[in-house]
């Protein structure tokens, strides 16, 4: 089945912080992609996974706002075509990386060219957290290093890691459609040696001391819950880049990481979204 439910959530008042946080809550509930605007956002979920009771999730965002929820069935179609027409446009990061789809023309020339046909998977590079993670990889390229990308989504960060000279890149993705999409994107970028695993953090139990760099662009709650497993994969002196949370959450993430020998070395931000850099003692 390729049918989706488009849930339109109109917020009054509406701010970017509200739509970003709401998208994070809905992502945890199984929604796969989001398109925000000045009045709210559209969230997409597979029809078989949709439950009308999900409307109560809006109450989880800690803002004073009125929310109006409307669900519309979208019958199976060519999702690449829909992204081309409505949402996904080429993006350039630091004038070094361009991310675009195979159907785009007039793509800017950059040193690293990444082709992503996103379908309904999250992670086209437009979100601030993806931008932050790409910027971190550009500043600290994993040349000759072993990289684990937790929650790889469309595979952008694992693919870029290989382009930047990583010896090995492993992407782990719990969502089956996103995993299959990442496999296609690996093929599109001629990086067949990127290894993909369709699993959650339990897959890390067999990866102790196997990584020089661990990256996770997920959300604060998942990161703090699984930080012990993340840390176990790092060799001594290994680095970790974490994003998917706000600047005000950095202290929470830092404190959760401390018992596992992870010390913060840097933090960069964009529109109040944070990317925390840590090193394993």
Image (cartoon, helix red, strand yellow):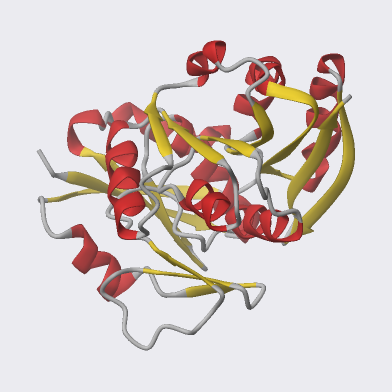
Left or right for 241, reference 170: right
Q: Nearer the viewer, residue 218 or 16?
A: 218
Taking the spot 46% from the left edge, 21% from the top edge, the residue there is 200
Taking the spot 40% from the left edge, 52% from the top edge, the residue there is 191
Where is the N terminus found, in terms of image quarters?
top left
Where is the C terminus found, in terms of image quarters?
top right
Q: Nearer the viewer, residue 143 or 139?
A: 143
Taking the spot 79% from the left edge, 47% from the top edge, the residue there is 247
Q: Is residue 219 something that shows in the picture?
A: yes
Left or right for 5, reference 242: left
Taking the spot 30% from the left edge, 53% from the top edge, the residue there is 187
Residue placed furthest toward the bottom: 106
Q: Nearer the viewer, residue 41 or 229?
A: 229
Left or right for 96, reference 273: left
The percent coordinates of residue 175 (x first, y second) are: 35, 32
The percent coordinates of residue 136 (x first, y second) are: 72, 54
The percent coordinates of residue 188 (x first, y second) are: 31, 59
183 shown above or below 226: below
The percent coordinates of residue 159 (x first, y second) are: 48, 51
């Amino acid at each position: 089945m390729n049918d989706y439910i488009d849930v339109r959530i109109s917020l009054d008042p509406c701010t970017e912080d509200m739509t970003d946080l709401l998208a994070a809550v809905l992502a945890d509930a199984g929604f796969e992609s989001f398109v925000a605007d000045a009045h709210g956002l559209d969230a997409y979920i597979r029809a078989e996974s949709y439950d009308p009771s999900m409307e109560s999730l809006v109450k989880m965002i800690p803002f004073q706002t009125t929310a109006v929820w409307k669900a519309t069935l979208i019958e199976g179609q060519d999702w690449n075509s829909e992204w081309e027409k409505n949402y996904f446009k080429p993006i350039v990061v630091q004038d070094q990386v361009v991310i675009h789809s195979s159907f785009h023309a007039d793509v800017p020339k950059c040193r690293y060219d990444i082709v992503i046909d996103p379908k309904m998977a999250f992670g086209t590079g437009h979100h601030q957290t993806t931008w932050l993670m790409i910027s971190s990889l550009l500043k600290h390229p994993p040349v000759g290093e072993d990289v684990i990308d937790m929650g790889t989504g469309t595979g952008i960060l694992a693919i870029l890691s290989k382009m930047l000279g990583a010896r090995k890149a492993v992407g782990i993705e719990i969502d089956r459609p996103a995993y299959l999409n990442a496999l296609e994107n690996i093929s599109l970028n001629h990086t067949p040696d990127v290894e993909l695993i369709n699993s959650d953090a339990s897959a890390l139990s067999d990866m102790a001391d196997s990584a020089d760099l661990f990256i996770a662009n997920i959300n604060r709650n998942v990161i703090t819950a699984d930080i012990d497993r993340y840390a176990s994969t790092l060799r001594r002196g290994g680095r970790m880049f974490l994003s998917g949370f706000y600047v005000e959450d950095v202290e929470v993430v830092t404190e959760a990481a401390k018992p596992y020998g992870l010390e913060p070395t840097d933090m960069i931000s964009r529109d109040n979204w944070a990317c925390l850099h840590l090193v394993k003692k």
